[in-house]
Each structure stands twice: as structure tokens, then as C-alpha cells.
Amino acid sequence: MKTANHCYQSKPAEFQHQWFVVDATDKVLGRLATRIATVLMGKHKPTYTPHHDTGDFVIVLNAGAVKITGNRKKDDVVYHNYSGYPSGLRETTMRSMLERHPERVLEAAVQRMLPKNALAKRMLTKLKLYVGDSHPHQAQMPEPLPL
């Protein structure tokens, strides 16, 4: 007797991309980034397929108001940006990044939790970060993201 031991592989025509909105005010950075990365990859869906972009869109409001836990975390975490040229390494602490571009801290955390392949760039384009309370995506009717 032959049994069917096949895994389900979803097809791109079957994908339904939803829109979610989340308010990042006083949410812990790592926990929020983990949940956002899971939704961007599509791992919260039963139709998840690793080699397709099955994830949903995520709108983050008040991205600069995330909560950073730890005593010296803002001074200890250093972001590196290398241009590829000699002496082209730029280092920025989390404290200065929060002052200049507060949304980039959450973006960097989410980006580092995504897979390191070609799909990660496409997944990251579905992340919409805003420092304020408003966003221009009202027409998509986003639902609140359960955390």
C-alpha cells in the first residue's frame, strides 16, 4: 500500500497578502522585531513555503518610541556601515542612531532576523516604518497585528 508523504507547496497565484498595523510605543525592540520578521516571512500562515514570498505587509507607527531594555545597551550596540573603500568603515552607536534616524534601529533589527538570501530584500520592502502616528496606507485597510 502506497502512502502519500508529500508536503504542500503553495503557488504564487494562491498567495493572499494582508496588511497589518502595529504601534511600537513602549514595545520591547527584540520581541517586536521577532514578531514582525515572522509575519514578513509568512511563517504565521499554514501555507508557508520557504522558497516563495508568502509574507504580509506590516506598517509600524511610532517606530522611534520602541523600548530598549538593558542598562548600557544604547552605548554598547554599534552599527557598522562599510562603503567598500579603504577607511570607509562608519560606526554609529544606538544612541546616536535613535537621535538621528529612530526608525532605522527597528529596521536593522528586523533585517537581521530575516533569512540571508535573495528573498530577504523583497520581504523587507513589505515593512513600512513611520516615526509618527499617521501613515498613507489607509486604502489597504490594515488590521491590528496581534502580538
Image: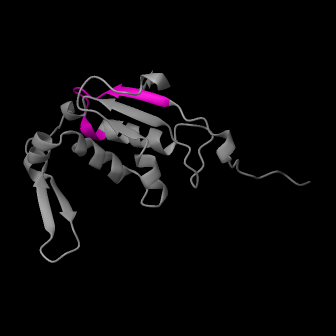
Q: Quadrant of residue 126?
A: top left
Relative to residue 40, is residue 80 drawn left or right?
A: left
Q: How many marks?
A: 0
Q: Where residue 61 appears, x then y in whole percent?
A: 29, 28
Q: Is residue 65 visible?
A: yes
Residue under the image location 22 percent in, 44 percent down: 105
Relative to residue 34, is residue 119 drawn left or right?
A: right
Relative to residue 15, is residue 139 drawn left or right?
A: left
Q: Residue furthest bottom?
A: 86
Residue under the image location 34 percent in, 50 percent down: 111
Q: Magenta span has 20?
A: yes
Q: Quadrant of the C terminus?
A: top left
Q: Where residue 114 appears, x then y in whole percent?
A: 40, 51
- What is the magenta range? 19-30
Q: Is residue 118 above or below residue 45?
A: below
Q: Quadrant of the N terminus?
A: bottom right
Q: Is residue 147 visible?
A: no
Q: Nearer the viewer, residue 70 or 48?
A: 48
Q: Where residue 135 appears, x then y in whole percent?
A: 33, 26
Q: Magenta span has 52?
A: no
Q: Is residue 75 above or below residue 117?
A: above
Residue under the image location 51 percent in, 41 percent down: 55
